[in-house]
């Protein structure tokens, strides 16, 4: 909903029923969406006395976040990186409904959207070509995907694709996942790897709570504040996403640090930077 109404002015109420009808969203789901956005401080809700869906308007935070999402949707580099990482994650998790992961399943999944905008067929195909050329995935029969050991490392180790691509070329095994894997041992023909997913998220969640409370006092402009809030939300979800996503959490943490380091000097900003350094170190120490 944020991503579809970024052009709406601040302090102007809009009928949420219009968005509900346009996107064909069931009423119970729409009520849930409004509750989430309202709870996050992105919108204010005005209930109608006669019932029906309420009027809504952006808060300053919500409008800033929506405008930031608009900027991201037009960023070709960010979209390309998103496509590659989401395809790797899709293959790792086993694709749709625990089946052997397929390219078509990815195209139909929520993972193929970037801040509300669907990735094009060309973007997905180019991402697959890049992943295959780096030795991170192997295409199989009927558009099925297999992770190579390098692709597996890339998903769980928090590193980047370029670092893992070089290591993968000398290792010939690939992994087909048929559902979630928790604390298991994943073995190829010539190796066995214990899976702890490379992250301890508790420290990141604690830091996210501190950021949520104190970051409004740092003095960021509207766009950077919205970006920081978006990254904080990723850290806040660290304990609720199973399995954890180390590379995504690390990127969010690093981006928050960059934003804080670009902010005006202040005791609160320095406190958050110090806390972030400790949290990132504790989360990825293993």
Image (cartoon, grey):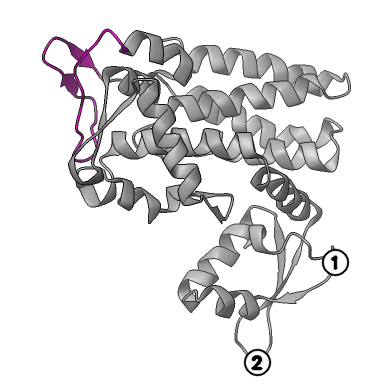
Q: Residues within 10 Å of mark 2 (few under 14, many from 20)?
A: few
- For the point 27% across and 7% down, which residue is it? 170
Percent coordinates x, y for residue 219 in the rendering: 87, 32
- Which quadrant: the N terminus? bottom right
Q: Which residues are drawn in magenta?
A: 169-194
Above/below status of 144 relative to 185: below
Above/below status of 270 relative to 178: above
Main structural element of the magenta stretch: helix, strand or loop?
Answer: loop
Check disc 1 and report the residue beneath it.
Answer: 11
- Who is closer to the viewer here, 166 or 24? 166
- For the point 40% across and 39% down, which residue is it? 241
- For the point 43% across and 28% down, which residue is it? 130
- Who is closer to the viewer here, 229 or 6? 6
Q: Residues within 10 Å of mark 1 (few under 14, many from 20)?
A: few
Whether residue 238 is visible, yes or no, is no
231 displayed left or right of 264: left
Q: Secondary structure at mark 1?
A: loop
- Who is closer to the viewer here, 203 or 263? 263
Residue at the outermost bottom position: 50
Residue 262: image quadrant is top right
Percent coordinates x, y for residue 97 in the rendering: 24, 52
Residue at the outermost left position: 189
Check disc 2 and report the residue beneath it.
Answer: 50
Above/below status of 277 relative to 36: above
144 displayed left or right of 5: left
């Amino acid at each position: 909903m944020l991503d579809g109404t970024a052009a709406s002015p601040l302090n102007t109420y809009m009928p949420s029923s219009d968005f509900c009808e346009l996107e064909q969203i069931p009423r119970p789901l729409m009520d849930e969406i409004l509750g989430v956005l309202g709870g996050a401080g992105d919108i204010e809700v005005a209930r109608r006395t006669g019932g029906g869906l309420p009027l809504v308007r952006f808060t300053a935070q919500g409008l800033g976040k929506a405008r930031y999402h608009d900027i991201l949707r037009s960023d070709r580099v960010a979209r390309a990186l998103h496509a590659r990482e989401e395809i790797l994650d899709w293959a790792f998790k086993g694709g749709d409904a625990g089946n052997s992961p397929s390219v078509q399943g990815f195209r139909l999944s929520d993972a193929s959207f970037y801040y509300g905008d669907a990735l094009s067929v060309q973007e997905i195909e180019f991402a697959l070509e890049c992943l295959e050329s780096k030795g991170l995935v192997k295409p199989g029969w009927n558009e099925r995907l297999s992770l190579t050991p390098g692709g597996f490392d890339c998903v769980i180790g928090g590193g980047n694709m370029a670092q893992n691509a070089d290591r993968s070329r000398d290792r010939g095994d690939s992994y087909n996942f048929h559902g979630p894997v928790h604390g298991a041992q994943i073995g190829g023909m010539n190796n066995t790897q214990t899976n702890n997913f490379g992250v301890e998220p508790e420290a990141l969640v604690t830091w996210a709570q501190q950021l949520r409370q104190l970051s409004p006092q740092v003095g960021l402009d509207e766009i950077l504040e919205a970006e920081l809030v978006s990254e904080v939300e990723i850290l806040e979800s660290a304990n609720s996403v199973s399995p954890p996503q180390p590379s995504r959490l690390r990127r969010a943490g690093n981006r928050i640090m960059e934003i804080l380091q670009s902010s005006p000097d202040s005791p609160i900003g320095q406190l958050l930077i110090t806390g972030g350094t400790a949290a990132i170190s504790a989360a990825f120490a293993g």
